[in-house]
Amino acid sequence: MNINDIQRFSIFTRIAELVKDRIMLGEYQVNERIPSVRELASEMQVNPNTVVRAFDRLVLAGIIYPKRGMGFFVSEQAAERIAADRRKAFEEEVLPAIFGEMEQLGVSMEEVLEIFRIYKNSKH
């Protein structure tokens, strides 16, 4: 998620996205305990209730799960669920915006593919 997108979301949504990012980056592993509500609230300088809302959202999405008295842990399929959700958002939100901009600017798909090839080659 890019910083411009993050700023338009609520704080608890930003915290949920931060946890998802850390899972995708491998900072939090499957079945590994994530920072506690208090730890993350302190790190983010927010009220613990805000982190609770973020964690509730992540539990409902099957990204994390609670263990009574032990905290929250990364679910088995967390990375796959996050990737699927982000791919869906990319296809439904980002690509239509790009295609609309391409149409307005008169940019062809061939031009985009060439730019993409150059980009891919520069990454290696």
Image (cartoon, rainbow, N blue to C red):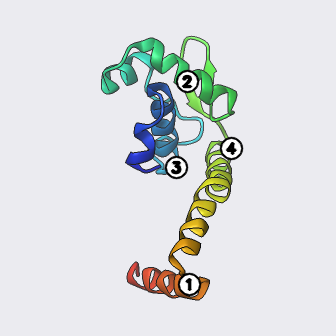
Tag 4: amino acid: Gln
Q: Of helix, strand and loop, which one carries label 4?
A: loop
Q: Of helix, strand and loop, which one carries label 3?
A: helix
Task: Return the mark for residue 4.
Answer: none
Q: Which residue is mark 1?
A: 113
Vertical side of 21 occupied by 41: above or below:
above
Tag 2: amino acid: Phe
Q: Residues within 10 Å of mark 1 (few under 14, many from 20)?
A: few
Mark 3 vs 4, N-terminal side: 3
Asked if the residue at tag 3 contacts the one at tag 2, i.e. Cβ–Cβ closer than 8 Å, the answer is no
Q: CA distance from mark 3 to mark 4?
A: 11 Å
Q: Position of residue 121 (x, y in %)?
A: 44, 85
Is residue 71 in sight in this rendering?
no
Mark 4 vs 2, N-terminal side: 2
Tag 3: amino acid: Met
Residue 35 is left or right of residue 67, and the answer is left
Task: Return the mark for residue 77.
Answer: 4
Task: Return the mark for residue 24.
Answer: 3
Mark 3 vs 1, N-terminal side: 3
Mark 2 vs 1, N-terminal side: 2
Q: Which residue is mark 2?
A: 55
Q: CA distance from mark 2 to mark 3?
A: 16 Å
